[in-house]
Amino acid sequence: MSTPFNFRPELRAPGASEAAGATFRPAALLAELPEGTLLRVTFGDLDILLAHTDRGIVAIDDRCPHMSAPLSIGRLDGCVVDCPLHDGRFDLATGEAVQMPNTGGLDADGAYHPVWTPAGKEPKPDVPGRKADARRLTRVKRLRYYPVRISGSTIEVAVPS
């Protein structure tokens, strides 16, 4: 059976540590999350994505770090989840974008990526205007993680109270 894996501590979701008053709460049964699947769980107004990757179980906000689409309706390939809205792909093991969304924009480090164009085609024009300005200023953030533990047959997630 897979177990939760460690992630970079600086990517921990704000308020989601035991020291900050978060408590582990039951999120799902292990049987509800077979390897290779995604599951949305909700605590009040907080939507969490549980992903059972090939490296273990991880919990993040169920929002694409680009434009907040629910990743729970995306696809999981190993440790990489894709967004159903703009085809961004994000590595759940590192928190990094492995494929920028096709709308372009800023990556987490601030580098600009143009609107995606298929190989062999002329680059799509970035027509000046408010939409182009918005694309140039939209930053893809790194994923934020919630601590996960397995207690018996239950997946528990530490969420702020």
Image (cartoon, rainbow, N blue to C red):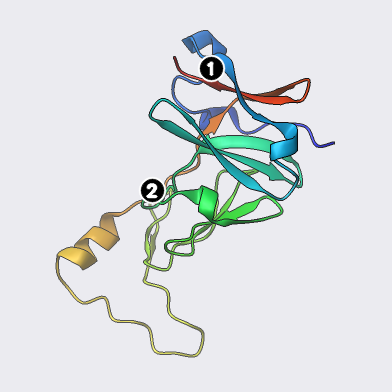
Vertical comparison of 156 with 115: above or below: above
Q: CA distance from mark 2 to mark 1?
A: 23 Å
How far across and how far down the image is residue 42, in percent? 48, 31
Q: Amino acid at mark 2?
A: Ser
Quadrant of the drawing holding the C terminus: top left
Name the residue: 74% across, 44% down. Answer: 34
Instruction: Look at mark 2 in the image and give the residue it sits on.
Output: 68
Q: Amino acid at mark 1?
A: Ser
How far across and how far down the image is residue 29, in percent? 70, 30
- The answer to whether 133 appears left or right of 84 in the picture is left
How far across and how far down the image is residue 26, in percent? 61, 21
Instruction: Look at mark 1 in the image and give the residue it sits on.
Output: 17
Which of the 4 quarters of the picture holds residue 155?
top right
- The answer to whether 10 appears left or right of 33 in the picture is left
Vertical comparison of 120 with 154: above or below: below
Which of 125 and 158 lies nearest the eye of the viewer? Answer: 158
